[in-house]
Image (cartoon, grey):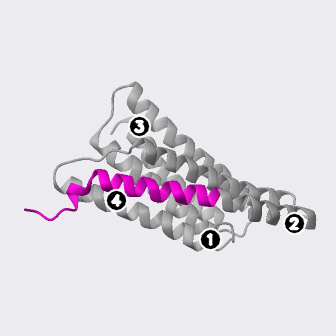
Amino acid sequence: MNWANRITLSRLALTVLFVLALNSSWQYARTSALLIFLLAGLTDFVDGEIARRYGVITNFGKLMDPLVDKIMMAAAFISLVPLKAVPAWAATTVVARDFLITGLRLMASAKGRVLPAERLGKQKTSWQIITVVFFLALLSIAELRYTSETSIWWLRARDEAGPILVWITVALTVYSGLGFTWRNRELIAPDQ
């Protein structure tokens, strides 16, 4: 297994640590979750850069990199719902789209094809990361400087800027999912 693939798998381990931290009640848990999530996001950039630069792009990497991204994002969105950061409908949309794309990739794999991540899918992931980091940063700020003023500021930022980010993210999520499905529609066409 090459280094790019090892880094991809390390993102999976970081996702588990992120969820544990975000759902912990210990002091600075939200700040720790933010830092872990940022590190996991960095690994997403690094593994692809290593694979391209050193010519070690593998079928494993083409399949696992987007799959691990989906697991990381689904975990983040689901974990932010009970914290009142992200609405449940948005998290459901993100997870449903990712299940659909993973299903298409499995169907392609059964037919001997690998469907790599597309540019629009990577942009969607970038917006998802921005949205998650925004809410994690708000939670971290509230945790580090908890006062009634901070609480009011957090609620205001969450209620004013948060929905804009959520709508952009959900729109890109749906659009990229529909586009990916349309471009690979022969996979779901009945066999002739």
Q: Which x, y percent locates residue 3?
A: 40, 36
Q: Which residues are magenta?
A: 165-192
Furthest-top residue in view? 54
Which quadrant does the C terminus fall into?
bottom left
Q: Secondary structure at mark 2?
A: helix
Q: Is residue 123 above or below residue 158?
A: above
Q: Earlier in the sequence, mark 4 or mark 3?
A: 3
**Crowding near the residue tagged with mark 4, few <14, some 14–19, many ≥20 C-alpha atoms within 10 Å:** some
The residue mark sitting in front, 3 or 1, is: 1
Foreground residue among 164 and 11: 164
Q: Are marks 4 and 1 in contact (CB under 8 Å)?
A: no
Q: Are marks 1 and 2 in contact (CB under 8 Å)?
A: no
| Residue 27 in sight | no
Q: Which residue is mark 4?
A: 102
Q: Secondary structure at mark 3?
A: helix
Foreground residue among 4 and 139: 139
Q: Which x, y percent locates residue 132?
A: 62, 56
Q: Earlier in the sequence, mark 2 or mark 4?
A: 4
Q: Earlier in the sequence, mark 2 or mark 3?
A: 3
**Crowding near the residue tagged with mark 3, few <14, some 14–19, many ≥20 C-alpha atoms within 10 Å:** many
- Circle 2: residue type: Ile
Real-space Cα separation, disc 4 to disc 3, in angstroms: 21 Å
Q: Which residue is mark 1?
A: 87
Give the total of numbered labels: 4
Q: Earlier in the sequence, mark 1 or mark 2?
A: 1
Q: Which residue is mark 2?
A: 152
Query: Residue 4, which numbered label?
Result: 3
